Image: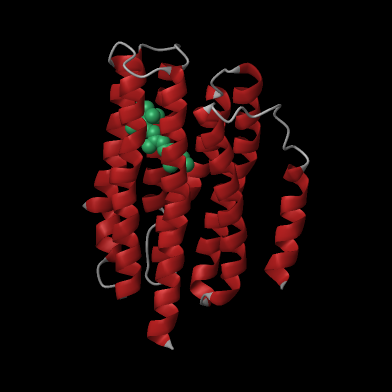
Amino acid sequence: MKSIMILSSFLAAPLFAASGGDLDASDYVGVSFWLVTAALLAATVFFFIERDNVGEKWKTSLTIAGLVTGIAFWHYLYMRGVWIDTGETPTVFRYIDWLLTVPLLMIEFYLILRAVTTVASSLFNKLFFGSLIMLIFGYLGESGNLNATIAFAIGCAAWIYMIWTLWGGEGKAAVSGTSASVQTAYNTMMWIIIVGWAIYPLGYAAGYLMGGAVDDASLNLIYNLADFVNKILFGVVIWAAAVEDKKASA
Ligand SMILES: *C/C=C(C)/C=C/C=C(C)/C=C/C1=C(C)CCCC1(C)C
């Protein structure tokens, strides 16, 4: 009940911002913005309501999952409007969204571990720092402020550094010895960071490095699909582990 009240006040505000001209049904990029917006809203509602159905130690993780999709929902409302009204790519808003949501996704690793074991905050610091470098250089490349290839190389190095931290470094050390549901959640989340996240640099490479093999419209479609997978699925994995954990301890 409490979460439903918090949720309704949180959702009431952005609904008024849902402008954006006429959506042409043949504009497949516009339609993808539309669909992802709806899915993000639904996911936000789901994570906040499900918060009441999981054990104490998972609640904060579900809150963060709901914040990620909620923040993205807000940006998608606006990005959809920019695309439909102007036909332009909302790069700045996309990166503002990523700057807020990617560190929140990273904090999830720290939270699920901290709930069950001792884990140094340096794990989060490394992931946070890696995300910033990856996104700042990605933006510099996409906005034309830095050579697209150099920006890409630095962004990829930061991404690989994060994967390494999760796979072999501090993360792996902390997760071994935790419960089966935590380990499954951790490993699935790590695979999302590897496979799901790979869609972004592949899209960037196709858009900027291969003589523009992919145009602006297709790149928006690719990024929209990637956000759908990486923001919603990521939260669902955490939710599923929390439900499993409750069953196991019941
Ligand atoms: C919710 C948004 C998410 C999970 C965004 C993730 C973005 C990336 C993994 C971006 C990666 C990039 C590189 C690895 C190289 C440089 C270009 C980027 C920024 C597209």
Q: In this view, does 87 lie above or below 113?
A: above
Give the position of the C terminus as an image quadrant. bottom left
Residue at the extreme bottom: 250
The percent coordinates of residue 129 (x first, y second) are 41, 38
Nearer to us in this view, 65 or 220: 220
Query: Which residue sits at x=32%, y=34%?
Result: 158
Display colour scheme: secondary structure
In this view of the protein, can residue 27 be seen by the observer? yes
- Give the residue at x 59% y 24%: 83
Q: Which residue is drawn at 75% across and 65% down?
A: 5
Determine whether, in the image, residue 164 is placed left or right of residue 25.
left
Q: In this view, does 155 lie to the left or right of 142?
A: left
| Residue 182 in the figure: left or right of residue 115 | left
Q: Quadrant of residue 175?
A: bottom left
Q: Quadrant of ligand 1?
A: top left
Q: Residue 135: give x, y in percent of width and height.
A: 43, 30
Residue 139 in view here: no
Residue at x 54% of width, y 27% of height:
26
Q: Residue furthest front?
A: 26
Residue furthest left as drawn: 168
Q: Quadrant of residue 25?
A: top right
Q: Nearer the viewer, residue 161 or 87?
A: 87
In this rendering, the answer to whether 248 lies above or below 162 is: below
**Quadrant where the N terminus is found in the figure:** bottom right
Viewer-proximal residue among 20 and 191: 20
In percent of width and height, residue 58 lies at 49, 69
| Left or right: residue 189 compared with residue 67 | left
Q: Position of residue 174 (x, y in %)?
A: 30, 63
Query: Residue 88 sits in which quadrant?
Result: top right
- Against 103, residue 151 (above or below) is above
Image height of 146 relative to 174, above or below? above
